[in-house]
Amino acid sequence: YIAAAFPSACGKTNLAMLVPTIPGWTAETIGDDICWMKFGDDGRLYAINPEAGFFGVAPGTSHATNHNAMETLHANCIYTNTALTDDGDVWWEGMTDTPPASATDWLGEPWTPDSDGPAAHPNARFTAPASQCPSIADEWEDPAGVPISAILFGGRRRTTVPLVTEAFDWEHGVFLGSTMASEKTAAASDQKGTMRFDPMAMLPFCGYNYADYFAHWLTIGKATDPNQLPKIFFVNWFRRDADGRFLWPGFGENSRVLKWIFERVDGESDAVDTAIGRLPTPAAIDTEGLDIDEADLQTLLDVDAEGWRASIPEIREHFARFGDKLPAQLQVALDTLEARLGAD
């Protein structure tokens, strides 16, 4: 079982309802949004999904990008700010290859493909019962929860951040989570495309001092045998080249990254220690049957030392917001990162 924290519109629902492209692999869904974790008697972290359903971003959701989500939406759903087709159905951008000839847009105005604005609001939503999801796991409502083997942090980054990075240890993983930055999306409601720090993807939800939240994560790491803690990884499905082309196909192909993560959890795959964390070699990612350029894969797994060095002042400014309350371990981790990058 894995848990993942991404900012809104960065692929949480797609990951939770993943249809693996690796032959013989299946994935089941516990939830796509909130997970509450506590220690079990065996010292491992167990997670439950406290929600009854899904509240997903509709635009971009289709049978090609998230088949299980589309199959969930057949009944008992609430649609917010989508378009309404002439025959009484809903529609949003990316749902089908061909848009309807006419519809009523999210503002209640007549719409055609020639209209200036989108038919659905970029943050249009669907609300659906989890019980209708084809991939829902039998244990999704088990009050005991499920044991978490890996925690994934991630965001939407065009440059710098590799496809997947393993933290050196729990403390380093907390540092990675505390420095998460992502391009703003429609779900953030302002300045789409610009960068903002969103530690642990909790910026809209953290109801107390973030520095205390970081300290809580660090305390969790000391509460059990380190070998019982989930491994922490940082993923980025959204790297692009200079022309804006995505380097990684994403969606179901992300199962190939999860395979490496599971192998790392089981001690069955090698990794290379770098300044920013542990990275897979290109050969460690299962690309059988995947049409990807070797140079693109190498770029996805390289350390952009120059880009990381350029981010150090931004991270220092981010940390400065928390003043004396910032846990000293995180400042040390930043200094260590800067020193490692200087050595490269």
Image (spheres, helix red, strand yellow):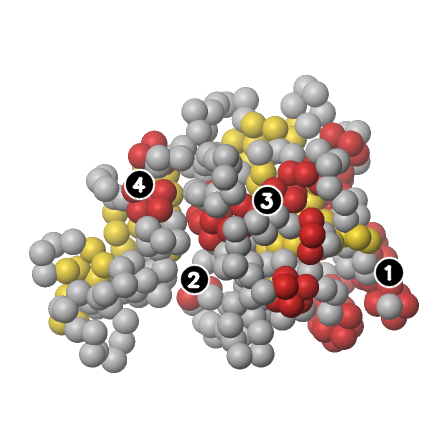
Give the mark, 2 or 1, whose residue is nearer the N terminus.
Answer: 2
Pair 3/2: label in front: 3
Horizontal arrangement in the rendering, residue 188 relative to residue 325 (left or right): left
**Disc 1 versus disc 3: distance between alpha carbons?**
28 Å
Q: Mark 4 points at which residue?
A: 72
Dot 2 alpha-carbon crowd within 10 angstroms: few under 14, some 14 to 19, many 20 or more: some
Q: Tell me how far mark 2 sits from mark 1, CA to CA.
A: 34 Å
Query: Tag 1, which secondary structure?
Result: helix
Q: Which amino acid does label 4 sit on?
A: Thr
Q: How far apart are marks 2 and 4 (CA)?
A: 22 Å
Reply above or below: 29 against 209.
above
Sequence-earlier tag: 3 or 4: 4
Give the residue drawn at x 52%, y 67%: 246
Give the distance between the C-alpha atoms of the residues marked 3 and 2, in whole angstroms: 26 Å
Mark 1 sits on what residue? 336
Mark 3 surroundings within 10 Å by alpha-carbon count, few (fewer than 14), some (14 through 19), many (20 or more): some
Q: In this figure, which residue is indicated by the disc labeled 3?
A: 258
Residue identified by numbered label 2:
187
* Residue type, numbered disc 2: Ala
Marks 3/2 in contact by CB < 8 Å: the verdict is no
The one nearer the camera, 245 or 7, is 245
Q: Can residue 211 be seen in this view?
A: no
What's the residue at 75%, 36% (across, down)?
Answer: 267
Q: How crowded is mark 4: few (under 14 residues within 10 Å), some or many (20 or more)?
A: many
User: Which amino acid type is marked by label 3?
Assistant: Leu
